[in-house]
Amino acid sequence: MSELKHLGNETNYDFNYRPDVLESFDNKHPENDYWVKFNCPEFTSLCPITGQPDFATIYLSYIPDEKLVESKSLKLYLFSFRNHGAFHEDCINIIMKDLIALMNPKYIEVWGKFLPRGGLSIDPFSNYGKPGTKYEEMAWFRMQNHDLNPEKIDNR
Amino acid sequence: MSELKHLGNETNYDFNYRPDVLESFDNKHPENDYWVKFNCPEFTSLCPITGQPDFATIYLSYIPDEKLVESKSLKLYLFSFRNHGAFHEDCINIIMKDLIALMNPKYIEVWGKFLPRGGLSIDPFSNYGKPGTKYEEMAWFRMQNHDLNPEKIDNR
Amino acid sequence: MSELKHLGNETNYDFNYRPDVLESFDNKHPENDYWVKFNCPEFTSLCPITGQPDFATIYLSYIPDEKLVESKSLKLYLFSFRNHGAFHEDCINIIMKDLIALMNPKYIEVWGKFLPRGGLSIDPFSNYGKPGTKYEEMAWFRMQNHDLNPEKIDNR
Amino acid sequence: MSELKHLGNETNYDFNYRPDVLESFDNKHPENDYWVKFNCPEFTSLCPITGQPDFATIYLSYIPDEKLVESKSLKLYLFSFRNHGAFHEDCINIIMKDLIALMNPKYIEVWGKFLPRGGLSIDPFSNYGKPGTKYEEMAWFRMQNHDLNPEKIDNR
Amino acid sequence: MSELKHLGNETNYDFNYRPDVLESFDNKHPENDYWVKFNCPEFTSLCPITGQPDFATIYLSYIPDEKLVESKSLKLYLFSFRNHGAFHEDCINIIMKDLIALMNPKYIEVWGKFLPRGGLSIDPFSNYGKPGTKYEEMAWFRMQNHDLNPEKIDNR
Amino acid sequence: MSELKHLGNETNYDFNYRPDVLESFDNKHPENDYWVKFNCPEFTSLCPITGQPDFATIYLSYIPDEKLVESKSLKLYLFSFRNHGAFHEDCINIIMKDLIALMNPKYIEVWGKFLPRGGLSIDPFSNYGKPGTKYEEMAWFRMQNHDLNPEKIDNR
Amino acid sequence: MSELKHLGNETNYDFNYRPDVLESFDNKHPENDYWVKFNCPEFTSLCPITGQPDFATIYLSYIPDEKLVESKSLKLYLFSFRNHGAFHEDCINIIMKDLIALMNPKYIEVWGKFLPRGGLSIDPFSNYGKPGTKYEEMAWFRMQNHDLNPEKIDNR
Amino acid sequence: MSELKHLGNETNYDFNYRPDVLESFDNKHPENDYWVKFNCPEFTSLCPITGQPDFATIYLSYIPDEKLVESKSLKLYLFSFRNHGAFHEDCINIIMKDLIALMNPKYIEVWGKFLPRGGLSIDPFSNYGKPGTKYEEMAWFRMQNHDLNPEKIDNR
Amino acid sequence: MSELKHLGNETNYDFNYRPDVLESFDNKHPENDYWVKFNCPEFTSLCPITGQPDFATIYLSYIPDEKLVESKSLKLYLFSFRNHGAFHEDCINIIMKDLIALMNPKYIEVWGKFLPRGGLSIDPFSNYGKPGTKYEEMAWFRMQNHDLNPEKIDNR
Amino acid sequence: MSELKHLGNETNYDFNYRPDVLESFDNKHPENDYWVKFNCPEFTSLCPITGQPDFATIYLSYIPDEKLVESKSLKLYLFSFRNHGAFHEDCINIIMKDLIALMNPKYIEVWGKFLPRGGLSIDPFSNYGKPGTKYEEMAWFRMQNHDLNPEKIDNR
Ligand SMILES: [Ca+2]
Ligand SMILES: [Ca+2]
Ligand SMILES: [Ca+2]
Ligand SMILES: [Ca+2]
Ligand SMILES: [Ca+2]
Ligand SMILES: [Ca+2]
Ligand SMILES: [Ca+2]
Ligand SMILES: [Ca+2]
Ligand SMILES: [Ca+2]
Ligand SMILES: [Ca+2]
Ligand SMILES: [Ca+2]
Ligand SMILES: [Ca+2]
Ligand SMILES: [Ca+2]
Ligand SMILES: [Ca+2]
Ligand SMILES: [Ca+2]
Ligand SMILES: [Ca+2]
């Protein structure tokens, strides 16, 4: 693991979109399907139109193939949206695509739950399964079953 | 996005049913299936018989095709039911149909959870999948799986 | 809607089983499958053996065909069990059958969650799909998937 | 305890106001101040104007002097409001006064939390301390400190 | 109670500020201090600057002197803010003052919990005790002890 | 129902395993599939090795065939484990088998949620469908779908 | 601590009232006022009239003087009520008095929250402060402030 | 209110500490003591040592004298900590002092609840009452009574 | 059960990884599919890079074949990670593999929910079905259905 | 702050009791009374008799005088109990005394909430106010008001 740059070392924070900070390491159990899930309640970005801060909890889950994302680099990557302007739906798709580019996972999904603006809140969800594999079917399966038991929202 | 009229501009509120305030913009990820969900705890309309105000939380989810609904216009649209008389079941169906007319989505569903009147509360749910596509099957799938874990209601 | 007798008019309460108070009105969206759900936390009846009052929350959901049940008449109907003696399981089946007789719905289900007696509580659930249709299959599907995530009960 | 009529015996239910069913027994610890609290989530009565059923949870607490109320007789007493017409505020005061007449307690308080009618719910609270004793001061103290941390109510 | 105009009768809704709809009736227990509390989760008014709808739950508690507010008239009064423009803090003070004018209570308090705008929510609280009585001291006591255990707010 | 021995009559409690106290009565709706569920938060037995008391909530659900279990006899049966020594897993299997012997149901499942010992808690779940019927397939279906949304446990 | 008989040793369980199993050990911080609290959700006893099992959570708190109760002996003591018949109010007073006899604490309080019987639940609370000390005043202070924010009870 | 710069107008966001954006307006009820509370779940600042983002919910309550803080200016002020480095304890004291300078309130308190770092979370609380008035005594009173019922924290 | 070494006997704790402490015993119901689930909120290990302690709740469920894991030995095994360095994902896979080696179960799954580090928390989930059996298909089924209703995480 | 050794630097973990790792820094607001609170859900120590691990959440609050405890050093200090044997009550008193020695605060309190052993959990609470000051009176005040609203505990 000597190639990991962030974990256990001093940290520099950059608050402009930095997909290059993402790092991966080898999956020691590639023969095995298993889930890795990150809960990220500290996501914040800016509205590209008004410049107003937006806040969200990001739930990010994937089934690794040969690579895993290193958690401290993921944290830095998510922090790099802090002063970056992007719509809610774009944030979720961008995060998913950057992680596909990094790890080439069997399956991945990203769910953002944003705080309300003007009395409405928006929760985008995107997913992906490796084309031509059973994971592609799984992506459809999970798209179809998504959020069948929605959480109660009352803005309080 | 220069054609958007509401976001970032001054707002006029009209409290009579105004489907024309709805605005859409282009989906930047049309190759992708993904969910967009709106949580709307501030819906209120009038009973068409008694004139009494009704209150609901609306949960609105869809898979876009080429268009997305702009969130501020959706807020104005929902606010326009404020002095409009319509039954609970009609509100939900009307909202769904207006959004189909606006966006022609792959799939859409609308769930209203109304506050009780006379000790009973009513929660209508309607959905739609584009006819002749797998989204139509999905609509039936989600109709069949709807609300299998109902929330506990005790009117407090 | 001139034929509706209860909504918006003065009310007389009868606390003995009165299936005849139920009223229906026309479904304006018969081409559409959609759910209507009633949450009824004020149900009370009597134990037919001991005469002791029983209390329950009733969750009632259906997919209408050509008729909908009018909500105020449903309230009066449920109130009419107040001084009526019937076992928990019977209440649920009776309510379901009376509503089938009234509306001939595509699908219906009734779930009662009773308060405990002697440290035990009983939650009967019954459902029905129109015979020979896909709603009959749906009834079996929902029977099979019923209550897979039971609520935590501690009698407090 | 041979004089207790209800506990362990067959029960007859009367659903019209019956303060005479209340029974007391001797306090074995009269030298001691201690609380006895009853939680009663199954209270139901009728609106004296409209005849409509009302539902409440009653919280009843007292510091006994020489007598305690027997719990099964209390249950029968509360059930006897079932077909009795009384306003919310009256129910609470009547219950408190009947229990003072029965037990002559050092202190007593009764809190009713009623289900909403027309979108509003009412929670009356009454208390009493034996005049000329420190329990009278306690009644004022608890009146002054009542409900400083109100529960969240959203009618759902 | 023959003078009550709203309870049990047909209702007309007026959505402009109407303090005159409030009605009172006689307190049958004036010798007694007791609390009456209303929980009102369906309050909505307009922002006087932007015209945007605001939503709140109102918690209203008082110790009656010779009069009580009739609950249906209170509902109509609260509904009359629907199309009325007023700041959050003003709403709470106006409601309190109108009820003092109506009932001349020993003590009264009004707490509004508004849904957020721009990520902030505002919860004004006002109270009053009859000048020159122990209820005036009680007002200061409850002001001093107000909200010592604040509810957790996360805008979801 | 004249043959029922326990309901409405005086009760004797035996705290050693007594499967013979179980009683059944006729199902009045045998043409119908419906669920009956018992929530039993007062289960306690003894560890067969250490003699230490164990505590659990038992969730018991079945689809009746021609018989239903009478609830008071079920309570007595569950109470009879009070001084009986049996492992957690055995309790659940024994209860299921005794009820199969009594009622010969179409389908039955029993879930025990035990309080922790040594920082660990154990939750066994067993089910059964009548061999050679669709209920046998249902048993496998529900086995496969069991506990996909586990409750959060923190031992407090 | 060589005199402690239970902790770390083999255990024999006796399910009949055994105050003699209680053991104490020396308080190493007698110069200091501090609280020790036990949460005991596994209490069960028998009703002395009907023989029916009762279940409760016991909350027990004290400020030690020279002795502390050893926790395993307390567990055995509480288990010894398993087959013992006593009323709810008596259980609480007996437990408090046995612990006063054992430890002679500066202050002690015992709160029992029992599961419902017949739709009612009973929560007795008793306390004690060493006579003639400030702890006696504290007992009255805590008696007066007891349960000002009662938990919500709905018997489910 | 013509002097208010932010409300209803276009907004510029500055993410460096800007106490000058705060604006006040006149209290229309200066004869009256009442509370105004802001719930601010979207506070974020930077650690002055490591540069890492910190997140908090700020609860801010005051009793106005002649001025109130305008809510949109407060929002902009809080947003201005976004790229500012300050310790948790300093943030709370700075916010309180800036608001005292702006409004000269009778009483004010600020409570920050920060998300954990390294498994620990920090919740500073500061308050102030106008010197030489009863509000100064109130500050000590509320300091002494602060957080007597702490929320359960488990870092999930 | 004479061969069990831990249950009911004195215990020695070893806080370095000790898979050899695991013990199994015979399944008395091998003809039956049933679930056994362990909830383990007291898991702690060390980060292999930084040496920092990590904390998790482990949820462990399996369908036994001929062997069951003895619960006290499982506790000792989990305690043996206390001073052992391993990544989150490895802990979960190691635990699963050790239990497969011990019991050769039909099916097993292990879910770890770790406390956050740096604002992110990680929840790995691994499962296994006996190759060439329906349990292998079940593993894929449960992999596909995993965590469709994610718990709300806010790091408080 | 150049003298702080831990914050922002590489960390060595020592899992045996190390009061010397605690560090303080200057209070910049000594003229001001304010609270600093730490929530510490990751505390674990060993039972001094059995060697078994114990787990707790520690709530630690103080009003600083001239010094504050640095949070990373506090974390290391708490981690150093990991392999240290001490009773629950002792842990709480030791932590409080070490922090008094470090900071000489005006007031401090420490509350430990331990996970259950043998069905019982123990929650010790200790506090301290500088002798001869109003903070000493405050210590008694908070001792007297401690835990008047106990959390519900059910060991799940
Ligand atoms: Ca909410
Ligand atoms: Ca919330
Ligand atoms: Ca419960
Ligand atoms: Ca409950
Ligand atoms: Ca006493
Ligand atoms: Ca609610
Ligand atoms: Ca509710
Ligand atoms: Ca927890
Ligand atoms: Ca409830
Ligand atoms: Ca005032
Ligand atoms: Ca939250
Ligand atoms: Ca949380
Ligand atoms: Ca938490
Ligand atoms: Ca201060
Ligand atoms: Ca619990
Ligand atoms: Ca728990």
Image (cartoon, coloured by chain):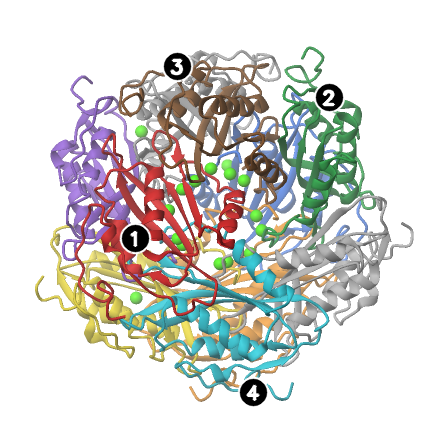
Chain colours: A brown, B green, D orange, E blue, F cyan, G yellow, I red, J purple
Chain to which mark 2 belongs: B
Q: CA distance from mark 4 to mark 1?
A: 44 Å
Chain to which mark 1 belongs: J
Chain to which mark 3 belongs: A
Tag 3: residue type? Answer: Asp
Q: Are marks 3 and 1 on the same chain?
A: no
Residue B17 vs G27, above or below: the answer is above
- For the point 53% across and 15% down, the residue is A85
Q: Are marks 2 and 3 on the same chain?
A: no
Chain to which mark 4 belongs: F
Nearer to me, G138 or A7: A7
- Residue bearing mark 3: A14
Nearer to me, F95 or D121: F95
Would you say the residues marked 2 and 1 are in contact, meaning their CB atoms lie under 8 Å apart? no
Tag 1: residue type? Answer: Leu
Of helix, strand and loop, which one carries label 3?
loop
Q: CA distance from mark 4 to mark 2?
A: 69 Å
Q: CA distance from mark 3 to mark 1?
A: 41 Å
- For the point 56% across and 87% down, the residue is F5
Front: mark 2 or 3: 3
Of helix, strand and loop, which one carries label 1?
loop
Left or right, J106 with reference to E38: left
Q: Are marks 4 and 1 on the same chain?
A: no
- Residue bearing mark 4: F5
Nearer to me, J95 or J42: J42
Whether residue J58 appears in this view of the structure is no
- Residue bearing mark 2: B23
